[in-house]
Image: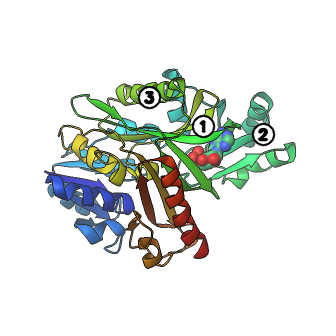
Amino acid sequence: MRVGICGAGQLGRMLALAGHPIGVTCVCYARSADEPGCAVGEFEIGAWDDEPALDRFAARIDVATYEFENVPLGAVQRIAATRPVAPSLLALETAADRVHEKTLFRRLGIETAPFAAIDSQEELERAVSTIGLPAVLKTRRMGYDGKGQRVLRAPEDVAGAFAALGSRPCILEGFVAFERELSVIGVRGRDGATRVYPLFANTHEDAILRVTIAPAPGTSPQLVDAAHRAITSILGALDYVGALALELFQVGDRVLANEMAPRVHNTGHLTIEAADTSQFENHLRAVAGLPLGSTDIQGHAGMVNLIGTLPDPASLLAIPGAHLHLYGKAPRPGRKVGHVTVTALDPGARDARLEDVLRVVRASG
Ligand code: AMP
């Protein structure tokens, strides 16, 4: 089975690595041969509007998937003309637009912050008068790691805010005073079989994910149930095939859905070492029409992103139980260049190992 991956970043690289042992060969569609995914397997070079390259890519694969959600529609349609694509175009399009995804969440009875679509400064001012302040103004499309958004705290922040985000279609969301950020990853096979990983608890620094731990500690049955119901209802509603990540804000025993990613997700990286089947392998199994694997996590796991600078790998490898993943990317401020996963049988031992990793990471600047 040959799976084409639109994109060749670290997610494409980890998908390709997960495919090897189960007989799935991945072909990454890359802009250049020095992208992370190209170092570990097959690839095709091309731009998203390069139709001959897209056709060569399609000819080399049995089925296509993505490693990021902003693949231009035209490119996916070109591939879909000759090869099955999973997740579906509907899933991709829904996730690419913050208003579409929140509208879907609401339709499925999943709580969200109050929100309004914004196409002008006047609409923004009207929405602020109903949603109130503080609020968060975000571009509807192409936002990630806190880019393309600003928090509006006082009336003077509202003036000029629409233009400051480029006068592009936006969404205004009520500010959620959450206790913590969680995520849940579910995977659905071609036969509709669905598995959900335990909840992940996430900590961000400068709006970029720094640490994930799993299973999230201190979760009540109501909270777990709400997260499970949310992810399974989205998977079902979109007739989804593959892994889907849902980012959540926890407020008491409630979860409010923030956004979804129709792909494997940074918060699920620790499943490589900690889960019976990693998110990468399960995504490939789903897309390739193979049976899904168990999503149980054994023990307690933590993951630290390496952002902006690369600590000395030897210092990280010297930490007992540390699993290092380097993406082969040149360090640049704000850029994810790798991650480290630790596992342990009890949360205290996991936290001690996480602290060791964070000490090395902080020492490297
Ligand atoms: P996003 O790009 O939607 O994932 O937002 C990036 C980060 O901004 C989130 O991880 C939150 O920490 C914060 N954030 C986003 N939306 C809201 C909101 N409506 N209320 C409070 N914080 C938010």
Label 1 vs 3, first from the N-terminus: 3
Residue depicted at 41% across the width and 25% down the height: 233
Looking at the rendered structure, which numbered label has been put on residue 90?
A: none
Query: Residue at label 2?
Result: 134
Residue depicted at 52% across the width and 50% down the height: 348
Q: How far apart are marks 1 and 3 (CA)?
A: 14 Å
Q: Nearer the viewer, mark 3 or mark 2?
A: 3
Residue depicted at 74% across the width and 32% down the height: 127
Assess whether mark 2 and mark 3 are in contact (beta carbons under 8 angstroms): no
Label 3 vs 2, first from the N-terminus: 2
Residue type indicated by callout 1: Phe
SS type, badge 3: helix
SS type, badge 2: loop
Asked if disc 2 is less than 8 Å from ligand 1, the answer is yes
Q: Distance between the residues labelled 1 and 2?
A: 16 Å
Please name whichever residue, 83 or 254, is drawn nearer the observer in this view of the structure.
Answer: 254
Asked if disc 1 is less than 8 Å from ligand 1, the answer is yes
SS type, badge 1: strand
Q: Nearer the viewer, mark 1 or mark 2?
A: 1
Residue 272 image point, x, y percent: 34, 53
Looking at the rendered structure, which numbered label has been put on residue 228?
A: 3
Label 1 vs 2, first from the N-terminus: 2
Query: Residue at label 1?
Result: 249
Residue 271 image point, x, y percent: 37, 49
Residue 310 image point, x, y percent: 50, 75
Residue type indicated by callout 2: Pro
Residue 132 image point, x, y percent: 79, 32
Would residue 321 appear left or right of 286 to someone viewing this image?
right
Q: In which quarter of the image is residue 169?
A: top right
Please name whichever residue, 80 or 40, is drawn nearer the observer in this view of the structure.
Answer: 40
Question: Is residue 147 at least partly visible in the picture?
Answer: no
